[in-house]
Image (cartoon, rainbow, N blue to C red):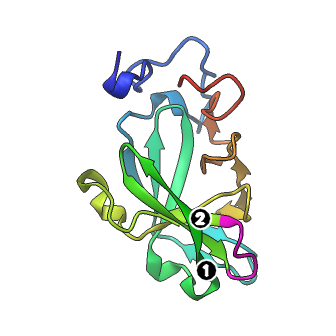
Amino acid sequence: MGLFGWTNIGAERPPFAVEPGPDQESVWDYPRPPAIAPDGRRVVVGDPDDPIASSSRAVRILETASPPTFYLPPDDVRTERLVSAAGRSFCEWKGEAEYWAHADDPGTPVGWNYPTPLPEFASIAGWFAFYPARIGCRIDDVVVRAQDGGFYGGWITDEVVGPFKGEPGTQGW
């Protein structure tokens, strides 16, 4: 049994995991606790012609069973187009998150950040992550698909294979 009671911690791919093909990653090879990986590809959030965020300085958070979550530095986010949204959540790895909504729709959070993350994730303090289910997200012009489940904000592209946390029957992952 792994840390916090998790049975899958990235040390061994479970038999039900999809075998990655060339140029693919299995989310079952990602570690737990998660890792931070710099990613220099162009990440665009919102309308590509008038984005809320655009960056080539993003990082991916890689955690066992979850598609990567992209975090963008605050300097690359048009924060004047965001408003604080209700609610908070706590991640066992990163700490307390605050939520952000598009100023045109303040009732629906489109992203979050960790203003004061736990020490292991201090490098992403104030960086923004976005839900691809609630706002368009692209990586190098590839449209991102949303992670199932409503709560999670993983970014699915053809380069990652699962199954992914959040899908029906995955509560114990």
Q: CA distance from mark 2 to mark 1?
A: 9 Å
In the rendered image, the residue lying farthest to the bottom is: 80
Q: State the image coordinates of residue 92 (x, y, percent, origin top left).
A: 37, 43
| Residue at 63% from the left image edge and 22% from the top image edge | 18
- Dot 1 falls on a residue whose secondary structure is strand
Q: Residue at x 65, y 58 (%)?
A: 131
- Point out which mark residue 111 bears: 2
Q: Position of residue 140 (x, y in %)?
A: 65, 63
**Region rendered in magenta:** 103-109
Prevailing secondary structure class for the magenta stretch in the rendered image: loop
Write the residue at 59% across / 64% down: 111
Marks 2 and 1 in Cβ contact (< 8 Å): yes
Image vertical order of residue 99 relative to residue 103, above or below: above
Callout 2 secondary element: strand
Image location of residue 117, percent across then percent down:
33, 59
Q: Quadrant of residue 115?
A: bottom left
Specify the quadrant that holds the N terminus. top left
Q: Residue type at mark 2: give it.
A: Gly
